Image: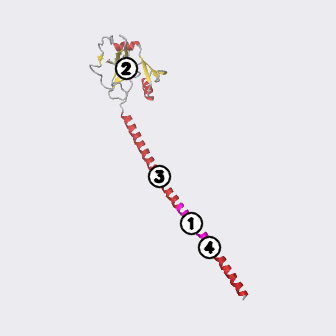
Amino acid sequence: MLELLDERERNQQYIKRRDQENEEIALTVGKLRVELGAAENNLIDSECHVAELEEALRDKQALLEASEKRIAELEAELVSQTYKLPHTQFEQIANLYEMQFDDGRTCAFHTDAQKAEQWLQACDGNRVQEYVKLERLQNALSGNSPVTPDGWISCSERMPDTKTAVLVAVEFDRKGDWRMKWATYIPGHPDANDGWIIPGASWKPSHWMPLPEPPQEVN
């Protein structure tokens, strides 16, 4: 009888231990399920975040492509407008050209008008000063003086034909202090001052006259 009781007690203790173990296993499984669910939620959140980042990246890429396209259009438009601008050609008027920087410093001297033109177009602010031999200036004046402008035409009366090189003159502050240069009349040109392009000068002329014929060679 005692043996049966002992056996029964041992069985009950065994069952109790098994119940405790099963309970611990159930708790562990529950924790694992909770952790697994949290991990799945984190994965879903991460995937959503990655999707948002990818969408934002696509938007930025599209914006960049649109910006590059617009820049290319503006550059093409600028080039087109640049080549449509009227072009002023130098004529060999002076005997010597002084290439100057925008602050008046001398860079070089040259006798080629084309070099002077290239210097003016190379950089904004570049200037060219022309020098004419006395004999050539006297031929241009042909015995006439701007003070008594026979042969000189007042700009208020008539302007020269467009894109034609002429001699221009204006009287400065002091009486008889006349300045003369060669110039081209191109109204509407972006670099013109009241329609005049006068290399190396910023004043506006009051008179002009056609250029003299070049000296003829004597055989």
Earlier along the polypeptide chain: callout 3 or callout 4?
Answer: 4
Q: CA distance from mark 3 to mark 2?
A: 57 Å
Residue at numbered disc 2: 203
- Crowd around label 2: few <14 · some 14–19 · many ≥20 (10 Å): some
Residue at numbered disc 3: 56
Amino acid of disc 3: Ala
Q: CA distance from mark 4 to mark 1?
A: 16 Å
Residue stretch in magenta: 25-42
Residue at numbered disc 1: 34
Q: CA distance from mark 2 to mark 1?
A: 89 Å
Image position of 29 with respect to 100: above or below: below
Image position of 13 with respect to 155: above or below: below
Q: Who's the residue at 68% across and 82% down the image?
A: 11
Q: Who's the residue at 51% across and 59% down the image?
A: 45
Amino acid of disc 2: Trp
- Crowd around label 4: few <14 · some 14–19 · many ≥20 (10 Å): few
Q: Which mark is residue 23?
A: 4
Amino acid of disc 1: Val
User: Mark 2: which secondary structure?
Assistant: loop
Q: Tell which tag, 2 or 1, sits nearer the viewer.
A: 1
Q: Is residue 65 magenta?
A: no
Within the image, what quadrant is residue 129 found in?
top left
Earlier along the polypeptide chain: callout 3 or callout 2?
Answer: 3
User: Mark 3: which secondary structure?
Assistant: helix
Amino acid of disc 4: Glu
Within the image, what quadrant is residue 120 found in?
top left
